[in-house]
């Protein structure tokens, strides 16, 4: 059996909305992690905050 090719999805958010907080982004991160795991689509590899 061949190894599947590796792919990446990079999502970038620009926090221009003053109502958005860092905790909102972490909440979204948790939702994405759960969706990826539940669908067995691969693995979540973390975040970068600048």
Image (tube, rainbow, N blue to C red):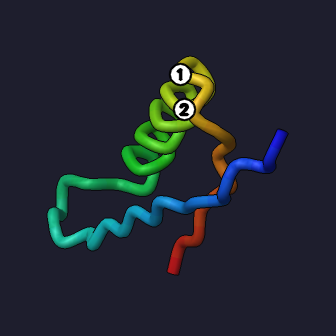
Quadrant assignment, res 14: bottom left
In the drawing, what numbered circle is on residue 17? Answer: none
**Residue that label 2 marks:** 36
In the rendered structure, are the residues bearing label 1 and label 2 in contact, judged by CB atoms less than 8 Å apart?
yes
Residue 9 left/right relative to 6:
left
Give the vertical position of 28 relative to 49 (above or below).
Answer: above
- Mark 2 neighbour density, 10 Å: few (under 14) some (14–19) many (20 or more): few
Q: Nearer the viewer, residue 14 or 40?
A: 40
Residue at image coords 46%, 65%: 10
Separation (CA) of disc 1 from disc 2: 5 Å
Q: Is residue 27 above or below residue 3?
A: above
x, y (%) of residue 17? 15, 63
In the rendered image, the residue lying farthest to the right is 1
Q: Residues within 10 Å of mark 1 (few under 14, many from 20)?
A: few
Q: Secondary structure at mark 1?
A: loop
Taking depth in this image into account, of 37 and 47 the one nearest to the observer is: 37
Give the residue drawn at x 27%, y 69%: 15
> Looking at the picture, how far across and down is residue 5, in whole percent?
66, 57
The residue at the point 47 percent across, 37 percent down is 32
Q: Residue at x 55, y 62 (%)?
A: 8
């Amino acid at each position: 059996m061949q190894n599947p090719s590796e792919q990446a999805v990079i999502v970038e958010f620009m926090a221009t909305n003053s109502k958005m907080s860092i905790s909102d982004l972490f909440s979204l991160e948790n939702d994405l992690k759960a969706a990826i795991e539940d669908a067995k689509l691969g693995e979540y590899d973390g975040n970068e905050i600048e």
